[in-house]
């Protein structure tokens, strides 16, 4: 691990930079594979009995630029309010691995993500926060604490606090089972009322399928149930990565 990686992340935090998780959002992990390239497809659909179905998808290209930095660019699309599918945003995701894998009881990473929405009135959406992972035998646990805010937007907004968690049992490389959860708590320093917070959780499956030398298909999918009145009743999400 390069000793200056934490300094780079700290600098990003100090640079000038209401959150709603989309149905295609996924659980970030803190590890980085140097030299790995991937084509990443994500999709999801969410439905609340009182609102039209919302559908989102994205496709991106990522690269493990160093032993501690993975960077990826996405094009994002969405469909909502019974309208047609349309381009939604371009996103630049950066993940920094801050500890050597397996050296400490908990692996730690950091996320910095910048998105430029199609509607420039939304300004620049920035998301950042620490990523954690630990293992107990065949059980892997992940937890992420994330902050999100729109800068240079045409509306006033505050930094929002979001969380993600994941637990999976590594049964077989090709098929693993577990749980995933996502939540939005409101302002980071003054959480919203209980009925305004969004909590979703449900069963998930994972797998890694080799398709040749140094070529792999990875997938994960989850069926999430709304655990609060502010969350969609049901969300189905899927991620497929081609790594080479």
Image: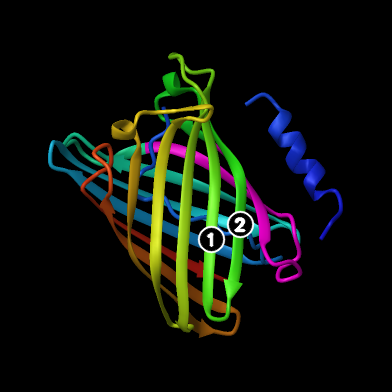
- Between 113 and 213, which is closer to the camera in this rendering? 113
Q: Secondary structure at mark 2?
A: strand
The magenta segment: 88-114
Image point (44%, 23%), residue name: 122
Q: Residue at x 24, y 44 (%)?
A: 232
Number of callouts in the render?
Answer: 2
CA distance separating discs 2 and 1: 6 Å
Task: Using residue 57 as the reference point, say whether residue 27 is left or right of it.
Answer: right
Q: Residue at x 40, y 70 (%)?
A: 178
Regarding mark 1 in the picture, which secondary structure is present there? Answer: strand
Q: Earlier in the sequence, mark 2 or mark 1?
A: 2
- Is residue 112 visible from the viewing direction of this image? no
Label drawn at residue 215: none
Identify the image quadrant of the C terminus.
bottom right
Q: Is residue 6 visible?
A: yes
Residue at 38%, 65% (x, y): give it. Answer: 179
Residue 19 lies within the magenta run:
no
User: Badge 1: few (under 14), some or many (20 or more) residues near its Cα, within 10 Å?
Assistant: many
The reply, left or right, for residue 148 in relation to residue 82 is: right
Indicate whether residue 98 is drawn in magenta.
yes
Q: Out of 150 and 73, give the one closest to the viewer.
A: 150
The reply to whether the C-beta atoms of the residues labelled 2 and 1 are less than 8 Å apart is yes
> In the figure, is residue 5 to the left or right of 155?
right
The spot of residue 222 in percent (x, y) is 33, 62
Q: Position of residue 158 (x, y in %)?
A: 50, 22
**Residue 161's spot in the image, x, y percent?**
49, 35
Residue at the disc numbered 1? 142
Q: Left or right: 147 with respect to 6?
A: left
* Secondary structure predominantly adopted by residues drawn in magenta: strand
Q: Quadrant of residue 64?
A: bottom right
- Residue beneath disc 2: 132
Within 10 Å of disc 2 (Cα), the crowding (few <14, some 14-19, many 20+) is some
């Amino acid at each position: 691990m390069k000793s200056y990686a934490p300094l780079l992340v700290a600098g990003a935090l100090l640079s000038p930079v209401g959150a709603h998780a989309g149905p295609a959002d996924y659980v970030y992990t803190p590890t980085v594979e140097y030299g790995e390239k991937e084509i990443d497809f994500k999709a999801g659909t969410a439905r609340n009995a009182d609102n039209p179905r919302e559908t989102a998808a994205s496709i991106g290209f990522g690269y493990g630029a160093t032993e501690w930095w993975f960077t990826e660019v996405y094009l994002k699309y969405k469909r909502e309010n019974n309208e047609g599918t349309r381009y939604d945003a371009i996103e630049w995701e950066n993940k920094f691995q801050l500890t050597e894998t397996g050296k400490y009881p908990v692996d730690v990473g950091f996320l910095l993500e910048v998105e430029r929405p199609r509607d420039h009135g939304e300004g620049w959406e920035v998301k950042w926060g620490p990523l954690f992972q630990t293992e107990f035998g065949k059980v892997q646990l992940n937890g992420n604490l994330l902050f999100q805010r729109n800068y240079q937007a045409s509306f006033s907004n505050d930094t929002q606090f979001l969380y993600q968690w994941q637990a999976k049992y590594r049964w077989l490389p090709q098929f693993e089972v577990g749980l995933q959860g996502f939540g939005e708590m409101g302002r980071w320093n003054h959480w919203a009322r209980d009925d305004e917070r969004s909590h979703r959780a449900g069963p998930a499956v994972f797998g890694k399928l080799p398709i040749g030398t140094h070529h792999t298909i990875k997938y994960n999918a989850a069926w999430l149930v709304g655990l609060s009145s502010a969350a969609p009743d049901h969300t189905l999400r899927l991620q497929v990565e081609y790594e080479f």
